Image (tube, coloured by chain):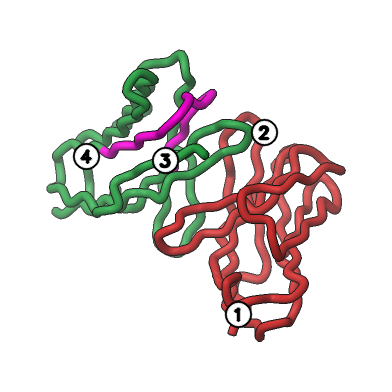
Amino acid sequence: SQKIEQNSEALNIQEGKTATLTCNYTNYSPAYLQWYRQDPGRGPVFLLLIRENEKEKRKERLKVTFDTTLKQSLFHITASQPADSATYLCALRYSTLTFGKGTMLLVSP
Amino acid sequence: NAGVTQTPKFQVLKTGQSMTLQCAQDMNHNSMYWYRQDPGMGLRLIYYSASEGTTDKGEVPNGYNVSRLNKREFSLRLESAAPSQTSVYFCASSEQGELFFGEGSRLTVL
C-alpha cells in the first residue's frame, strides 16, 4: 500500500526564516498532491494543490514543489511568523485522498 | 455561510452503546467524507460518498455505517461502540479536489 512520510519531529525556526517541510511517498505518483494546515482542536484547512505535471506552485508566502523522480514534495513558508505555527499535512490523491501524519511547525519570535 | 457543520462536538459513550454523528454542508458539493484522526496515525478515511445515493468504504470502515441522506447531509453511525473507536472524527466535503473540513467531533468510548 502507499506510504506517506512526513517528519514526525517538530520543526523549530526563528521568525523571519524560511520553513521547509518534506513529504515523501512510495510507489507510484499521485494525480495531485495537496498541503493542509491544522491548528490544535480545529479541522484541517486547504492551502495548496500541485498536479503531477507541475514542478512548482506559489501562493503569497507559500511555495510547493513536486518532484516525481524523487517522489517528494517540499513545502516552503518564507518570512515565517509566529502565526504560522501549526501542523502541516500533505495529502496525495489516488482513488481517494490519503493524508500523511503531519509535521508540527513552531515559529519563535 | 457555515461550510461543513458537525454535531455533536463532544460525546462520551459506554462500550456497546450506539450513536450517530451528523454532518451537513451548504456548499452544494457532490462528495463527502468521514475521517478519523488519532495521535500518531494521522487522518484515516472511514467512508466516503462521491455523490448523492452512493457510499464507499475507505481505509478503516469496520464498526461503522454511513448514510448519505441527501446532497447536504452525510451521517456516520457506530452501532456498538468500542474503546478503539475513541477518536476525533472529521467530516469533509469537496467538489474540485480541495477538501473542506468541519471542526471535528470528539468521541470517547469508555
Seen as rendered, the residue at the extreme top is A53
Chain painted in green in the figure: A
Residue A53 in sight in this render: yes
Between the C-alphas of marks 1 and 2, the distance is 33 Å
**Type of residue at label 4?**
Ala
Chain painted in red in the figure: B
Q: Residues within 10 Å of mark 4 (few under 14, many from 20)?
A: many
**Type of residue at label 3?**
Ile
Res B104 quadrant in image: bottom right
The magenta segment is A21-36
Element marked by disc 1:
strand
Q: Please name the residue that numbered disc 2 is placed on.
A: B95
**Type of residue at label 1?**
Val
Residue at image point 37% right, 23% down? A66
- In the drawing, what numbered circle is on residue A19? 4
**Type of residue at label 2?**
Glu
x and y, in percent, of residue A101 in the image: 41, 50
Q: Residues within 10 Å of mark 3 (few under 14, many from 20)?
A: many
Q: Nearer the viewer, residue B49 or B60?
A: B60
Mark toward the viewer: 1 or 3: 3
